[in-house]
Amino acid sequence: MEIVGGGKVIELGPEHEGPHEIEEHEFFQESVVLVWWDFENSIGGYHRIGHEPNWRDGPHINLFNNLFSPEWIYKNTSFVPMQDRDRFENGFGCGDACRFEFKNGQAHWTIKDTDVSAELVVSDTHPPVDIYPRGGSLGDVAPNHMEVGSTIGGSVTIKGKDYAVNGLAFRDHGWGVRIWEAFVCHRWIAGTFGPGQSILALSFMGADNVINEFGCVIRDNKLIYAKDVDVLVYLEADGLTHRGGHLKMELTTGEVMEIECEVLQKGVVTYIHGYAVVDTMCRMTCGDQVGFCDLETANNAQRGRYRPYTAINAIEKNGLHGV
């Protein structure tokens, strides 16, 4: 991949799609994530399989499994024991509930639960890349990370209603030590305008109280980093959920991108090792370009342990919820 305006990038081949060597640290984790949206059907999803093989109570999985449709929101946030069959050569699983496999050059996701199922095939629109900074607390969040803008097809069934999927997707794969308890707050925007352009932006504050910001655009197989990133979130009165946001990135080429994020449906609240995270699928616009993104936020400035239950614009409880 060509770099425009300076910087470095690591392209990652298919050999990095499956499990990596497990480090000895208690907080070693390996996770795969998929966010997606189909504008024609107004359906989407947010799926994360997070393996924690060294957890103090035995190997566990942090599963975030969510589907969105005009009538229903399905949410399954679980911390469950990890079985030997959940880790295999070309992917990761969480029992029968959610499974990721990389085969024939594509990412395949299978979801199965009461009243919901999905068979999703994700096709990358550029080579997978590792683009996160290596130093500081931001580098500690993602010591090894793969990012890919994609398209998605397949099928989804919710409460007996079938959908043929044709949409946009963004996926990632991370491995290494990740100490969630050290997180204070973050904003993460990952999305795509289609095969020609994907966006990644992040602001993060860790235990060192330093705010780190990072962003880039991948355009026609060319990577352009941002030299200035500003993420604004329209926070709800609950101090947890949001109703959209705005991203401004000044690229190293001098180009300034102004991106507006408009909520497509209520988000979902996940709670992971004392850190409450909200993921909300958004319509993303930049000039006359239209795409989708996940605007993920977390606010933990007081380093509290209380689990939030009041969520104005997101679903907190597991289950199938009517819209």
Image (tube, rainbow, N blue to C red):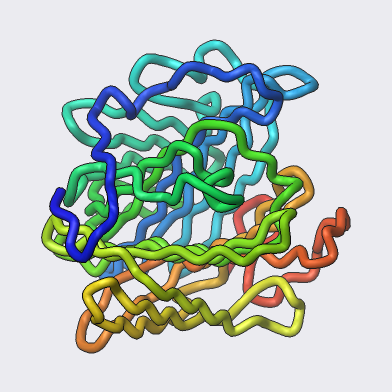
Q: Could you say which is closer to the camera, residue 17 or residue 10?
A: 10
Where's residue 260, x and y in %? 40, 84
- Image quarter in which the C terminus is found: bottom right
Where's residue 242, x and y in %? 61, 77
Q: Is residue 135 left or right of residue 161?
A: right
Residue furthest out toward the top: 84
State whether residue 2 is above or below residue 200: above
The mark total stands at 0
Residue in view at x 51 percent, y 47 percent: 135
Q: Is residue 71 left or right of residue 274?
A: left
State whether residue 206 is above or below residue 217: above
Residue in view at x 41 percent, y 75 percent: 228
Question: Image quarter for residue 235?
Answer: bottom right
State whether residue 194 is above or below residue 22: below
Where's residue 125, x and y in %? 17, 51
Q: Is residue 168 left or right of residue 188?
A: left
Q: Could you say which is closer to the camera, residue 148 or residue 85?
A: 148
Residue 278 can be seen in this image: no
Residue in view at x 65 percent, y 45 percent: 77
Residue 76 can be seen in this image: yes
Q: Could you say which is closer to the camera, residue 214 or residue 315?
A: 214
Where's residue 161, x and y in %? 39, 55
Residue in view at x 76 percent, y 63 percent: 300
